Amino acid sequence: MLSKFSGSHQNLRYFFLLAFLLGAFGDFSVSGSFYGVLFKLALSDTYRIILSQLGAPFEIGDISKSTLAIVWNMRLPRVFLALIVGAGLSMCGSVMQSTVNNPIAEPYVLGISAGATFGATLSIILGFKVMIGLGSFLGAILATVAVLLIASMQGRMTTSSLILSGTVVNALFLAFSNFIISIGANADSVMTIKFWTMGSLAGTSWGHLTLPTIIVGIAFLFFSTQYRVFNAMMMGR
C-alpha cells in the first residue's frame, strides 16, 4: 500500500513538473518574440499579433506593418528554430550518453565538435562558404570514425577507451583547426569562423524551419523505435 502511494505521489510530481515546463515553454516563446534589440513591444500586442496570425479574431489594425513583420517574420521564426535546435541537441545528448553508458559523454568529450569545427574552418579558409554546413558534417563524421577506430584498437571497445580516444581526437582536430587559421586565414575568415563557432539564428525565416523539423522528427522517431532494441542489447552484455 505504501509503495502504491509513493508511486502515485511521484507521478503527481512529474505531472506538475511537466505542466510547469510547458507553461515556461509558452511564456519564453512569446517573450522571445516581444523583446529584441530594436525595440520592446507590449506583451499584449505580441499575443494579439501571434494569435491573429493563427486565425484568432483579434483586431491588430492599430499595430504598424513593420511591427507585425518584425514579430511574425523575424523574431518568431528564430524562436521556433531555437526550440527545434534545442530539441535536436537534447536528443543527441541523450542518445550519446545512453550509447556509451556514460552520463558525461557529449560531443566535446568525444571529439565530434572539434571535427565539425575543423570541417567548417577548412571550408571557410578554402572559400567554400556555401558548403560550411556540409564541411562541418563531414568533419564530424571523420572525427567519429577516428574515435571508433582508436577505441577498438585493442579488440574491445569500452567506455573508458571511447572517452580517452575522444580526448585525443578532440585535441588533434583543434590543433588542425588552429594551424589552418594561422597559415591561411585573413580578417574576414577569422570573423566568419568566430561567428560560426558561436552560432547564430540571424536571418531565419519560416522557410528555414522545414528541413530541421523533418530531420529532428525523423531522428526522434527512429531512436524511439530503437529503445527496446537498445535495452535488449544492453541486457545481453
Image: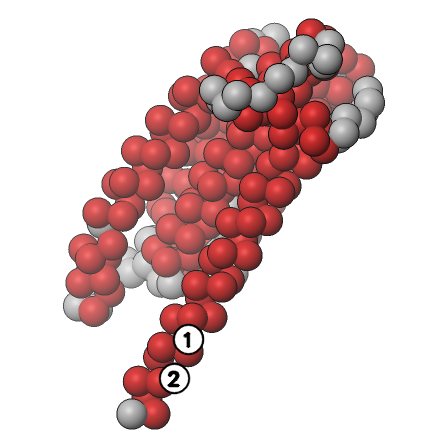
The residue under the point 61% across, 8% down is: 127
- Which mark is on residue 76? none
- Say which of 45 and 183 sits in front: 45
Image height check: is 215 above or below 5?
A: above
Image height check: is 102 above or below 226?
A: below
Q: How does the figure colour the protein chain or chains?
A: secondary structure
Q: Quadrant of the N terminus?
A: bottom left
- The answer to whether one can see residue 203 in this image is no
The residue under label 2 is 6
- How busy is the neighbourhood of tag 1: few (under 14 within 10 Å), some, or many (20 plus)? few
Secondary structure type for disc 1: helix
Image height check: is 221 above or below 46?
A: below
The residue under label 1 is 10
Amino acid type assigned to the residue bearing label 2 in the image:
Ser
- In percent of width and height, residue 69 lies at 65, 11
Secondary structure type for disc 2: helix
- The answer to whether one can see residue 31 in this image is yes
The residue under the point 62% across, 42% down is: 27
- Say which of 162 and 132 sits in front: 132
- In percent of width and height, residue 182 lies at 74, 24
Inter-mark Cα distance, 1 to 2: 6 Å
Q: Could you tell whether 188 is left or right of 23 in the image?
A: right
Q: Quadrant of residue 160?
A: bottom left
- In percent of width and height, residue 216 lies at 38, 34
